[in-house]
Amino acid sequence: MRLGTFIFLLTFLFFECYSSKILIFNPIFGFSHVKFISKMADIIADHGHHVTLFQPYHIALKNLDGLVKNKNIEILNYHPTHYEELLKAEPQTFSFFWDSYLVGNPVIGAFLMPKLLGGEFKKTAMEVLSDQKLINELKDRKFDLVIAETFELTGFYLAHLLDVPCIPMMSAVRYPIFNDQFGQPSLLGHVPQIGSAVAGEAGFYDRLNDMFRFFFMGISQEQLNKYQNYFIEEAIGRPVPFWKDLVKQSPIYITNSNPYLDYAVPSTAAIVQVGGITMDLKKLKQVGELPEEYENILKERESTVLISFGSVIRSYEMPESFKAGLIKVFESLPDVTFIWKYEKDDLEFQKRLPKNVHLKKWIPQPSLLADKRVKLFITHGGLGSTMEVAYTGKPAIVVPIFGDQHHNAVMLARHGGAVAYDKFDLKNGEKLTAVVHEMISSTKYQENAEALQHVLFNQPIDPKMNFLNHLDFAIKFPNHRAQVPAINQLGFVAHYYLDVLLFLLVSSIVITYLAISLLKKVLGKCLTKKTKSD
């Protein structure tokens, strides 16, 4: 027997002995979430596990073909009974996020967002969990493990019904109420909130703002999960465990954060940071040729700027005042070519644009970002785009619209290759023009962006191997929770020793009071004796 054949058979037998049957819950809602989970499925399947990707549709999201590369992955698309309505309806794009001060208000957002987002999950989630035929079919497959996104709780309850261990994962950097279940201390002071300066520069107002926003962000996340808990219990038709009791059974929590990109925060071994697993370093180093139409566009001028605000927020729904600000930029920089992802054919709007602007309904974003002729990327700061910017060493103006995008913007900007830009300042064409011109003409942004890229390419712990090693660990030890601090199970008062601090404070006050009273009496008697003797 040849050596190559022997090694192949040995590898095959190893994977057959040690591979597991894994169900990955991939809710079809946001493209970046779906893309991340699809890539994760590829990595797990390439590692030798048998992967089934279960995809319930919350919206009729398109352009999903080709996201999954591994042909051994079985994809189960679950189309709810109202799927025809989803196909006919315009995809929910949350256009009000563009210029809404109300949603950005932490108090109003805390009570508005839960039902707004939870309502988008409700119909399909209830149908999945009440579909007994589906549950029985999945039970018959005898999965060893379920991996579920934490933003949508259906996957945890599906695993509960299948009686299979479930690993939580998040396609964003973090989700504080879930991180808390795995022992991560408060992020206060470590990660600045909207409107606050970073630690070291932060004053009293910044710390007050941090606490205020962090408190209401926690309420918003708790309310979203409680709302889901409510309709999930209704769908199943009996009392079910609270979501925290299900989540905290896992030995690990997988997050799409990267310690060399993100803010440094205290953490535990249970929180596994895998940010960067979607990046193919070989492809980034060896970018193929662009389509001819883009090659021709990039040849027009020395500098090209790429503009894209993602898939959930659409450029064509941008307020007219914002569009006017961008047009001012285009007109002020005639020597720069602009490629703008604009999702709608609009001849009237096209007529308002100068000749240096190209509107495209779809763009090959990774390839364009890897091209040296593209000097700057104007982006909404979704985590997928943020990772692509960081790994391609491209300067960026990050204009966060909602959600975790503000965090991603300041996270990237702190490395010096990007600028976080307020969305409400898009209407200020002069200000934006100055920023664009500065970032194209100054070499410091490019140098800083490339320095970050070099760090990410040489980080000592490979995100992919980190993920796979922890996955194998969780499969072997699905109930191991020793790496989660026991103090995390205590209430807020006991966790931070507030009762002890209060006791010590009161004791100190009482002792000080008694000491002063005693001293007064002693001094009083001494003075009285002295007076009498005189």
Image: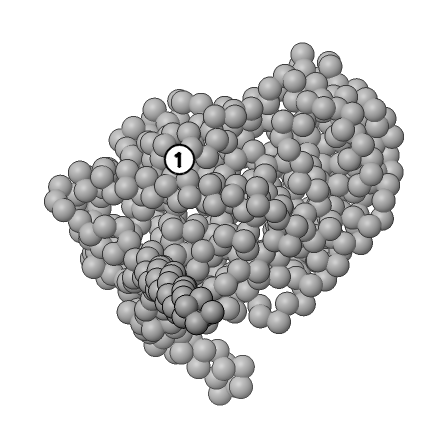
Please say whether residue 162 is visible from this viewpoint: yes
Residue drawn 67% across and 27% down?
425
Judge left or right: residue 398 versus residue 110.
Answer: right
**243 or 41, which lies in front?**
243
Tell me: residue 355, above or below residue 3.
above
**380 or 432, which lies in front?**
432
Residue neighbourhood size for the residue with mark 1, other residues' Cα within 10 Å, grouped as few (<14), some (14–19), many (≥20): many
Judge left or right: residue 340 versus residue 250.
Answer: right
Colouring scheme, one of rainbow, by chain, secondary structure, one colour: one colour
Q: Position of residue 125 (x, y in %)?
A: 28, 39
Q: Which residue is mark 1?
A: 110
Mark 1: secondary structure: helix
Residue drawn 37% across and 41% down?
219
Q: Position of residue 82 (x, y in %)?
A: 29, 28
Question: In the rendered image, which quarter is residue 10 located in?
Answer: bottom left
**171 or 485, which lies in front?**
485
Q: Position of residue 283 (x, y in %)?
A: 66, 56
Tell me: residue 513, above or below residue 356.
below
Q: Position of residue 414 (x, y in %)?
A: 67, 51
Residue drawn 85% across and 44% down?
442
Residue that protrudes farthest toward the left in the picture: 238
Judge left or right: residue 359 versus residue 14.
Answer: right
How many numbered marks does the figure carry?
1
Residue that protrudes farthest toward the front in the picture: 534
Please say whether residue 53 is visible from this viewpoint: no
Residue drawn 52% across and 26% down?
101
- Tell me which amino acid carries mark 1: Ala
Question: In the rendered image, which quarter is residue 520 located in?
Answer: bottom left
